[in-house]
Amino acid sequence: MTFKIGELSKIASTKVVTIRYYEKLGLLPKPLRTSGNYRIYSEEQKDRLCFIRRCRNFGFSLDQVRELLDLSSQKNQKCIEVDKIAGEHLIAIEQKTRDLSRLAHELRKIKLSCQSGGRIENCRIIEALSPDQSS
């Protein structure tokens, strides 16, 4: 089965411009062209794009996606490198989660100091977000 770029876009829930970008980066092989110069994608390219999108949905960087794609083609290799990439990514996500929790805590504290209905000149949120004026 083959797909035009619009069909592939819908199947993979990916914008056409993103598909072209992945082609430009070499993550997705260049498709064949019809006599009318339309891109035609194979089932294998569709599966590859879906794999890329799934990786991106998990927050993997494009470099990590490239590595995972390379590793996925080495069927007889041990998956230690895949495990390493996933482990490093998990550590980064957990750190971001901690950072976001601290940020949410600070924002809650700032918001609690807000006196709704007051004037901007007395706004504690604006004051807390503004650079320190004492220097």
Image: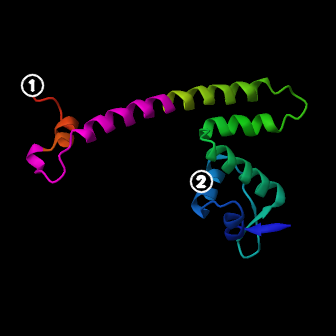
Is 111 inside the magenta-drawn segment? Answer: yes
x and y percentages locating residue 55 in the rendered image: 67, 43
Secondary structure predominantly adopted by residues drawn in magenta:
helix
Residue sitting at x 80%, y 38%: 72
Report the magenta residues as a range: 97-122
Residue 123: quarter of image? top left
Residue 132 seen = yes
Check if mark 2's residue and mark 1's residue have beta carbons within 8 Å.
no
Residue furthest to the right in view is 76
Residue type for callout 2: Tyr
x and y percentages locating residue 64 in the rendered image: 65, 35
Residue under pointer 2: 21
Element under disc 2: helix
Residue type for callout 1: Ser
Q: Nearer the viewer, residue 21 or 8?
A: 8
- Where the N terminus falls, by quadrant? bottom right
* Other residues around mark 2 within 10 Å, as few (<14) / some (14–19) / many (≥20): few
Q: Nearer the viewer, residue 79 or 131?
A: 131
Is 111 located above or below residue 21 in the figure?
above
x and y percentages locating residue 69 in the rendered image: 74, 40
Mark 2 vs mark 1: which is more N-terminal? 2
Is 17 inside the magenta-drawn segment? Answer: no
Q: Nearer the viewer, residue 12 or 91?
A: 91
x and y percentages locating residue 67 in the rendered image: 70, 34
Residue sitting at x 75%, y 25%: 81
Q: Which mark is residue 23?
A: none
- How many angstroms separate mark 2 from mark 1 (CA)? 48 Å
Residue under pointer 1: 134
